[in-house]
Each structure stands twice: as C-alpha cells, then as structure tokens.
Image (cartoon, grey):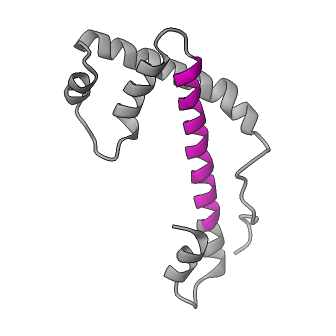
Amino acid sequence: MNALQYMDAYDYRMNLGKLKKEVNSIILIYGLCDMVNRAMTLVKYFTPNFGTEYYDVLYSCFCRHRKMADMEIMLELGMSRANFYRKKKAALRYLGYYFFEIVVPQSANKRYKPSFPETEE
C-alpha cells in the first residue's frame, strides 16, 4: 500500500498527530525490514561454505507467508534433524553477527528516520 492509498483509507477528519505517528511507524518498520533483508543477503553470499543453505533455512523458518513446522522444512530441504538444527543455530548466529556488526552500524544516522518530530500532536 502506498502513502496515498493509506491516506485515502483515513477519514478526512483524521487526527493529524495520530497520522504522523503511524506514518513514522510504517517508515521505521520498512527500514527494519530492509535491514533484515540486507543481513539475510550477507548470510547468503558472504558466509563461508554453507551460505545458501543457511539462507534457505532462515527463509523457510522465518520469512514465508505460511508458517511451516520444522519437520516440513527438513523434508523440503532434504536435511536430517540434527543437520537442520545445527544449520539453523549457525545461520541465526551469522544473521545476528551480520545484522549487529555490519548492517546496524551502516544504517545509523542515515536512512529511514521519521520525518516528523514525534512530540507533535
């Protein structure tokens, strides 16, 4: 939904302060989603040995539209139970490392900051 559609969904007598707060929240959520996506890309392309497998595990567990059980994901990816959980744990470690050590510092003070002061009501 783009910004104009979002504003059309609101009543014309809308509370401007509430709208600004909600638009700020949408901008911040978009920014966080973009940051997680960048970290996932780093996992896929810059993790030694199993980058694509780690990405597939993370995507299957956390990014799909439909929630799947771990057993379904294991069968889909063709992994044993022990191998799946070992790769899931390692993938989450890499994701956390890339997110907090690379993506967050790059994003600090640069993008996706609210354009309206939150104190305005």
Position of the C terminus, as image quadrant, is bottom right
Q: Main secondary structure of the magenta part?
A: helix
**Which portion, as a residue range, is magenta?**
23-46
**Residue at 71% over, 64% down:** 118
Most distant residue in the bottom direction: 13
Q: Quadrant location of residue 35? A: top right
Q: Is residue 85 above or below residue 66?
A: above
Most distant residue in the right direction: 109
**Viewer-side residue, 12 vs 59:** 59
**Residue at 26% over, 28% down:** 73
Q: Position of residue 72 (x, y in %)?
A: 20, 29
Q: Is residue 49 above or below residue 43?
A: above
**Viewer-side residue, 118 vs 115:** 115
Q: Is residue 93 left or right of residue 18?
A: left
**Viewer-side residue, 35 vs 42:** 42
Q: Is residue 101 left or right of residue 89?
A: right
Q: Position of residue 109 (x, y in %)?
A: 79, 44
Q: Is residue 34 above or below residue 92?
A: below
Q: Any magenta on residue 2?
A: no
Q: Any magenta on residue 42?
A: yes
